[in-house]
Amino acid sequence: MSAIDGVARRTGKAGPPAIKPVIFDRRQRELLAAVAILGALLPLGVQGLYGTGIMITSAIYGLLALGFYFQLTLAGQFSLATVGFYAIGAYTSVWASQHGGFLVGFVTAVLVTGLIGTLLKLALSRSPLIQFAIATLAFGELTMIVMRNWTGFTGGGTGRFGIETSIFGLMLDTPREYFYLAFGVLVVGLGLAVLVERSPVQRDLIFARGMGDVARTTGLSTLRLQAAAFGIGAAYMGGAGSLLAHTSAFIDPTSFHVEISLDVLLMLLLGGSGSLWGPPVGAVILTLIPEWLRDLADYKELVYALIILLVIVMLPGGLASLPNTLRARLKERRK
């Protein structure tokens, strides 16, 4: 029993009301449930292989961008190694799935990329921001060189084809089943991110990111926290790579290119780097923009750049911050 409770019992007066963290006022779990229901119903309104393929790509990119959110927003590290973790996860999953199906491949990919990401952060712990980014870019390029030349593991230029996806003996082989698999993993990933956000871990990570020297004086192990967050982000990227391999049934070195790291950065900027909902929102928008601009072949690149620039300038918090922005403006008008 606390001292406040003891005083309350003796005097008959209640103590001061408990102060809840602001995050507990956000309906994250309700929103997650709504997203899960919406995603489950989405295939009913989308017909054809092409539309389903776009949904699968959006789900995979959402998981990939969520990993970047952990690395940039929580760990405070600007990394360009996304494509490296993506590729490692894909090829590791294909290799491991031969010994136990998709689940074994997926879990192995997540664990391997998470470990590599943690070790990479620890190895570069003394590197300033710019040097860290350059080093991670080099890591991504080195990874792709290894993948292209390690033919026994990756198949080299021939790639890996005929990749099967079986879960507990159930074979998945239709685009709709692939979508539900990718979307289900994304929902689980979002659920884990919600748990992190509602725990003291996120508070400590933000403290370590913004005031590392002060955090260390309190006894907080900032390096371990940031390494763990960076490793978790890499694990998400490895999981996305696993989904890419098993939903496309074919991968080769051309499936992975440096532009993926830049695309993921744009997803975070478009969706919003300050919210865990920003990455999936940005992934969906960045996947759909080229489809919306298909009829503007001559001006597609210009319009594409203008849309991204307008969103970044007019909504610094990203598209995920739009509801809060509109709500704040409505309150101002009512005053």
Image: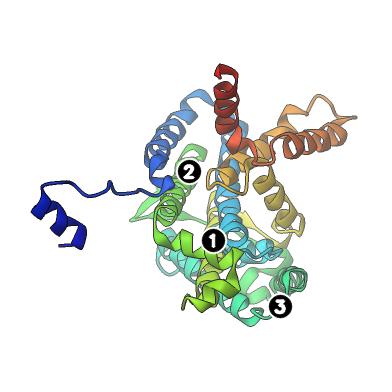
**Quarter of the image where one finds residue 82:** bottom right
**Percent from the top left, x then y, of residue 40?**
42, 34
User: Could you tell whether 122 is left or right of 228 in the image?
Assistant: right
Instruction: Measure the C-alpha gap from mark 1 to mark 3.
Output: 19 Å
Mark in the foreground, 1 or 2 = 1
Q: Residue at x 59, y 54 (%)?
A: 64
**Percent from the top left, x then y, of residue 2?**
19, 62
Q: Amino acid at mark 1?
A: Ile
Determine which residue is flagged by label 1. 206
Comparing 207 with 183, the one in front is 207
Q: Residue at x 55, y 32 (%)?
A: 324
> Compared with residue 117, is residue 70 higher up or lower down, i.e. above or below?
above
Determine which residue is flagged by label 2. 183
Q: Residue at x 22, y 50 (%)?
A: 15
How dense is the environment of label 1, judged by Cα within 10 Å: few (below 14), some, or many (20 and up)? some
**Percent from the top left, x then y, of residue 313?**
76, 38
Q: Amino acid at mark 3?
A: Ser
Task: Give the mark nearer the N terminus: 2 vs 3.
Answer: 3
Callout 2 secondary element? helix
Determine which residue is flagged by label 3. 127
**Quarter of the image where one finds residue 250:** bottom right
**Percent from the top left, x then y, of residue 53?**
60, 38
Instruction: Measure the C-alpha gap from mark 2 to mark 3.
Output: 36 Å
User: Could you tell whether 85 is left or right of 20 in the image?
Assistant: right
Instruction: Measure the C-alpha gap from mark 1 to mark 2.
Output: 28 Å
